Amino acid sequence: MGCLPESVVVRSIDVSAVHRDGQARGEIICFAMTRDTVMRHVELLKRCKLNTVGVHTETMSMVRSFDHLNRRESDVDVTTLYVDMGWGGTCVALAHGRQIVFARYIQIGGRHFDQLIAKALGCEAANARAHRLSMEGPTARTAHVPGASASGEEGAGRLSAAAAQASGSPPPSAGGETATASDRRVGAVPAEYCREVEAREEPPQPPANVDLTELLDTIADELSMCRRYHQGLFPNRTIDRAIFLGGESRQVWMCQHIVKSLRVPAQLGDPLARMSREGTPGTPGLTLDEPQPGWAVPCGLCTSPTDL
């Protein structure tokens, strides 16, 4: 990295034992951040009179927002590709159930598409973004899947049960008796997988016929390299599903073009789908009856342990 070891803060995840060049080695994922950046965040929080109780990476938080769907022992056999498409770049993770086994950051995001459009149209980046967002109508509303979502009362009950489980006490039911959890995923698709993403041959053309396929193909190529690296570590495993997240994934045509190259079943993620929304006051810019894939990291941070 071209810097002194004491100048960065590093978190690591042990993945597995591997054999390379005839020697047994350990595969480890390392997340690094400059110490100066960490201290600036700490000072900012102090000025806001907030206490820091945990430090977690964006990648770990993204995967953790779906931990509740991977609670069974058999879920470790399911390989999931998480693709968080943001404005500055794309965060990628591969997980076996809850366990992260691969992570990478791709330096291509929404701003690169905006810059390409702005250069072609000779306009500001904000206008270019508005052009890009107009390329396709609003994201389709989340379709109701029987058994996949709960009402506000049921959602509150689930949260109470989870809190009771965390404290070690049995969750009470409405009638004062001990409640038993019903089996989930029996003939139902989780509400967090709100929309199937099907392959699309060509993306819609923006104004001035700017060609965006090169950027999309670059992301797809990077994801293909991630898949090949995972295949080298775990030859007997393949990717079972891909989950698209991040604010830029709301433009589903971008995800559809990438899926065409990946050729794996894919869904648009909605980490807020499990939350009760009844009586929630309106928030400018946030429509709760539509998928909100950009909230994966905040949702994951809410359920992360306090490790400081």
Image (cartoon, rainbow, N blue to C red):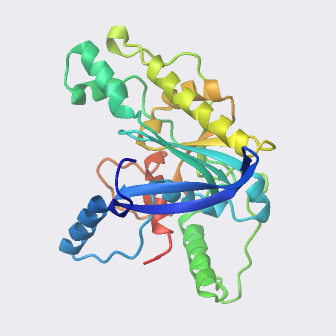
Q: Can I make out residue 8 in this image?
A: yes
Location of residue 220 in the rendering, given as x and y in whole percent from the top left corner: 55, 28
Looking at the image, residue 117 lies above or below residue 306: above
Q: Residue at x 39, y 60 (%)?
A: 5
**On the picture, is 273 further left or further right than 119?**
right
Q: Can I make out residue 277 in this image?
A: no
Q: Residue at x 22, y 67 (%)?
A: 44
Tag count? 0
Q: Residue furthest front?
A: 22
Location of residue 38 in the rendering, given as x and y in whole percent from the top left corner: 31, 63
Q: Quadrant of residue 143?
A: top right
- State the residue in front, 167 or 17: 17
**On the picture, is 10 further left or further right than 23?**
left
Q: Residue at x 63, y 81 (%)?
A: 165
Looking at the image, residue 201 lies above or below residue 162: above
- State the residue in front, 162 or 157: 162
**On the picture, is 32 further left or further right than 160?**
left
**On the picture, is 91 further left or further right than 114?**
right
Location of residue 24 in the rendering, given as x and y in whole percent from the top left corner: 73, 54
- State the residue in front, 253 or 220: 220
